[in-house]
Image (tube, rainbow, N blue to C red):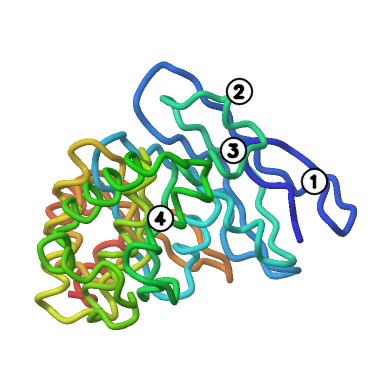
Amino acid sequence: MNQSMAWATAPTSAGSDDCTLSCTCTEAGGHIAIENLSVSYGSQKVVEDFSLHIPRNAVTALLGPSGCGKSSVLIGLNRLCDLIPGCCVTGSVSFSWLDNERLRGDLIQLRRQVGMLFQRPNPFPFSIWRNLEFALKQHGLKAKVEIADRIEAALKEVGLWDEVSDRLNDSALALSGGQQQRLCLARALVLDPSVILMDEPCSALDPISTQKIEQLVLRLAEKRTIVLVTHSLGQAQRVADHMALLWKLEGVGKLVERGTARQMFDSPKHQLTQTYLQFAA
């Protein structure tokens, strides 16, 4: 397993010294700065020299055709890439408002600050209550009153409390797909992260559930930074403040264009952006 990812540098499990992603956090500003990020799986490079500043407390959408590396960029931000054998990431990531000393080398604290919502709902095969309680206890919280308060607050934030408050001990797997996805979002929110990564969170949902997730995204962005991978241009138009388009060029994913959502939809600068917005609509 490659342990050479964000927040501290280390050689790869194969003994290489050049597969490192440094992460520096300073107090000034309000953005995530990604500089020269490259991602490889074994000998296959999937993202090369990706650089982007992501504004704090806003929604930034990553767009592009399948296979251009959008999801690989996401998992580099909270070091889930560490869990993938043979994955190598180089470059740097800085969260300008976080405490570098506290988070350096501490994956638990990093993932508490940078939560993730996946493409398909992935609740644990526990009760609804236990799904959220488990996350809190894994992060060291033991006080029963605080656990109960956090669980209720998280379920209310995603609009689930009124739907499930009378069956919190029922299996989470008995929920509908849309409810399961909101439960997974609550499981991330219960830890009070400042960043939420979303990897096509609505691709497996019906239109009504999709609308609920999008409304949540807009509310969450008032006090959290959202990085959203989506193939839906309609979704990007509805929720994104900023966008970045990736494209597979010469066999590897690269950043083609970045800007505000309005600017990129109204007056894209790159021919590939114009083409993508035209034919992906």
When asked about the image quadrant of residue 167, the answer is bottom left
Report the mark closest to the observer, 4 or 1.
Answer: 4
Three-letter code for the amino acid on which mark 4 is drawn: Glu
Tag 3: amino acid: Ser
Q: Which residue is mark 1?
A: 18
Give the alpha-carbon distance from disc 4 to disc 2, as whole Å.
Answer: 27 Å
**Percent position (x, y) of residue 238?**
11, 58
Residue lying furthest top in this view?
Answer: 28
Task: Using the numbered discs, state the Cα–Cα distance from disc 1 to disc 2 in whole angstroms.
Answer: 23 Å
Query: Dot 1, how many residues are within 10 Å of its Cα: few (below 14), some (14-19), or many (20+)?
Result: some
Q: Which residue was labeled with disc 3?
A: 92
**Is tag 4's residue or tag 1's residue first in the polypeptide sequence?**
1
Vertical position of residue 210 compared to residue 61: above or below:
below
Label 4 neighbourhood size at 10 Å, few (<14), some (14-19), many (20+)? many
Seen at 44% across and 77% down, the residue is: 125
> What type is the residue that disc 1 sits on?
Asp
* Residue displayed at 16% across by 71% down: 210
Quadrant where the N terminus sits is: bottom right
Cβ–Cβ under 8 Å for marks 4 and 1 = no
- Residue toward you, 210 or 141: 141
Q: Earlier in the sequence, mark 1 or mark 2?
A: 1
Identify residue for label 4: 133
Instruction: Tell me the residue that label 2 is attached to.
Output: 101
Say which residue appears at 33% left-offset and 62% top-offset: 129
> Which image quadrant is residue 88 in?
bottom right
Q: Residue at x 26, y 43 (%)?
A: 149
Give the amino acid type for the residue marked by disc 2 in the picture. Glu
- SS for callout 3: strand
